[in-house]
Amino acid sequence: MAQGTKKLSKPIAAKSGKRTNAGIMKKGRVEIAPKRASLVKANNLNKRLGAQLAAGTERHLAQKAGHLELLAGGKKDRKKAAEAKK
């Protein structure tokens, strides 16, 4: 068993002048696209259904809030639709 501290040939110098990559965003998770026809079809269906769910949720929130002009389907859009019908 070793006793005492490790004897180094050169003293360890503190790092200076080097930039850190703290502000650089890391690469995201890589997702490999499916190759089988059935999996490709299922992937496309999932993507489409997910988009429909997100759009429906945003529309529902806009109708509930009513004062959000950024989201489609709010009070502003309902007034325009009512005027267009007349």
Image (cartoon, helix red, strand yellow):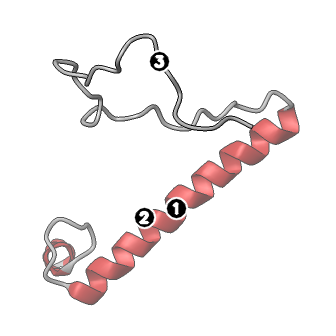
Mark 1 belongs to which amino acid? Gln
In depth, the one of 22 and 80 nearer the eye is 22
The amino acid sitting under disc 2 is Ala
Quarter of the view holding residue 31: top right
Residue type indicated by callout 3: Leu
Measure the C-alpha gap from mark 2 to mark 3.
63 Å
Callout count: 3
Query: Element under label 1?
Result: helix
Marking on residue 55: 2
Residue at the image position 35 percent from the left and 73 percent from the top: 59
Of the image marks 2 and 3, the number of the one nearer the N terminus = 3
- Name the element at disc 3: loop
For label 1, the residue is 52
x, y percent for residue 56: 45, 71
Contact between marks 2 and 1 (CB within 8 A): the answer is: yes
Q: Give x and y (percent) for residue 8.
A: 47, 18
Q: Position of residue 83 (x, y in %)?
A: 13, 77
What residue is disc 3 on?
Answer: 8
Give the secondary structure at mark 2: helix
Determine contact: label 1, label 3, CB under 8 Å: no
Q: Residue furthest front?
A: 3
The correct choice, above or below, for 16 with respect to 55 in the image is above
Q: Residue at x 82, y 40 (%)?
A: 39
Left or right relative to 66: residue 64: right
Proximity of marks 2 and 3: CB atoms separated by less than 8 Å:
no
Binning the other alpha carbons within 10 Å of mark 3 as few (below 14), some (14 to 19) or many (20 upward) gives few
Q: CA distance from mark 2 to mark 1?
A: 5 Å
